[in-house]
Amino acid sequence: MGTYERAEFALSHRHPDDPSPIDECSYFGCRRPIYRDEKNWELFGTWFCSAVCVARHVDAKRLYPDQIHDGQH
Protein backbone atom coordinates (compact mmCIF):
# COMPACT_ATOMS: atom_id res chain seq x y z
CA MET A 1 0.00 0.00 0.00
CA GLY A 2 1.63 3.24 -1.11
CA THR A 3 1.63 6.67 0.46
CA TYR A 4 0.77 9.54 -1.85
CA GLU A 5 2.02 13.11 -1.80
CA ARG A 6 -0.38 16.04 -2.20
CA ALA A 7 1.31 17.01 -5.47
CA GLU A 8 0.39 13.65 -6.95
CA PHE A 9 -3.31 14.45 -6.47
CA ALA A 10 -3.08 18.12 -7.49
CA LEU A 11 -2.41 17.60 -11.18
CA SER A 12 -3.91 14.68 -12.99
CA HIS A 13 -1.64 13.49 -15.80
CA ARG A 14 -4.13 10.93 -17.01
CA HIS A 15 -6.80 11.48 -19.59
CA PRO A 16 -10.33 11.94 -18.10
CA ASP A 17 -11.47 8.87 -20.01
CA ASP A 18 -8.76 6.70 -18.42
CA PRO A 19 -10.43 5.14 -15.36
CA SER A 20 -7.28 3.38 -14.08
CA PRO A 21 -7.34 3.20 -10.28
CA ILE A 22 -4.21 4.23 -8.36
CA ASP A 23 -4.99 2.02 -5.35
CA GLU A 24 -7.82 0.14 -3.65
CA CYS A 25 -9.74 0.61 -0.42
CA SER A 26 -7.73 -0.82 2.48
CA TYR A 27 -10.75 -2.32 4.23
CA PHE A 28 -10.51 -6.05 3.46
CA GLY A 29 -14.28 -6.39 3.04
CA CYS A 30 -14.47 -3.67 0.37
CA ARG A 31 -11.43 -3.26 -1.91
CA ARG A 32 -13.16 -0.70 -4.16
CA PRO A 33 -10.80 1.15 -6.50
CA ILE A 34 -9.31 4.49 -5.43
CA TYR A 35 -9.11 7.05 -8.25
CA ARG A 36 -6.84 10.09 -8.40
CA ASP A 37 -9.63 12.61 -9.12
CA GLU A 38 -12.01 11.53 -6.33
CA LYS A 39 -11.93 12.52 -2.66
CA ASN A 40 -11.14 9.54 -0.44
CA TRP A 41 -10.17 8.96 3.18
CA GLU A 42 -6.55 8.56 4.33
CA LEU A 43 -5.60 7.09 7.71
CA PHE A 44 -1.93 6.63 8.66
CA GLY A 45 -0.86 6.29 5.02
CA THR A 46 -3.59 3.88 3.91
CA TRP A 47 -6.55 4.78 1.71
CA PHE A 48 -10.26 4.09 2.15
CA CYS A 49 -13.19 4.82 -0.17
CA SER A 50 -15.58 5.97 2.60
CA ALA A 51 -15.90 6.89 6.26
CA VAL A 52 -17.82 3.65 6.74
CA CYS A 53 -14.79 1.64 5.57
CA VAL A 54 -12.51 3.61 7.92
CA ALA A 55 -14.83 2.85 10.86
CA ARG A 56 -15.04 -0.82 9.96
CA HIS A 57 -11.25 -1.04 9.55
CA VAL A 58 -10.63 0.27 13.07
CA ASP A 59 -13.52 -1.81 14.45
CA ALA A 60 -15.47 1.24 15.62
CA LYS A 61 -18.84 0.62 17.23
CA ARG A 62 -21.82 2.97 17.14
CA LEU A 63 -23.32 3.13 20.63
CA TYR A 64 -25.42 5.36 22.81
CA PRO A 65 -23.44 6.76 25.77
CA ASP A 66 -25.63 4.87 28.24
CA GLN A 67 -24.56 1.57 26.63
CA ILE A 68 -21.04 2.00 28.04
CA HIS A 69 -20.60 0.73 31.61
CA ASP A 70 -17.26 1.06 33.46
CA GLY A 71 -15.40 1.55 30.19
CA GLN A 72 -16.85 -1.70 28.81
CA HIS A 73 -19.23 -2.05 25.87
Image: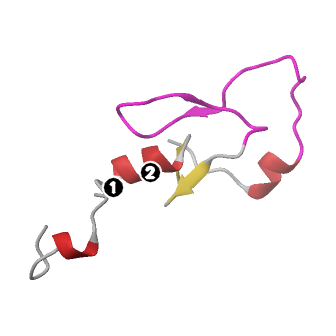
68 with respect to 36 (left or right): left
The residue tagged 2 is 54
- On screen, 59 above or below 16? below
| Quarter containing the C terminus | bottom left
Q: Is residue 37 magenta?
A: yes
Q: Which residues are magenta?
A: 11-38
Query: Of the residues shown, which amino acid type is indicated by label 1?
Result: Val
Q: Residues within 10 Å of mark 1 (few under 14, many from 20)?
A: few
User: Where is residue 26 drawn, in percent x and y?
Assistant: 45, 40
Tally the numbered discs.
Answer: 2
User: Where is residue 1 drawn, in percent x and y?
Assistant: 50, 41
Query: Of the residues shown, which amino acid type is indicated by label 2?
Result: Val
Q: Which mark is residue 58?
A: 1
- Tell me where residue 14 sits by quadrant: top right
Disc 1/disc 2 C-alpha distance (Å): 6 Å
24 with respect to 5 (left or right): left
Q: Residues within 10 Å of mark 2 (few under 14, many from 20)?
A: many
Q: Is residue 17 magenta?
A: yes
Q: Are marks 1 and 2 in contact (CB under 8 Å)?
A: yes
18 or 8, which lies in front?
Answer: 18
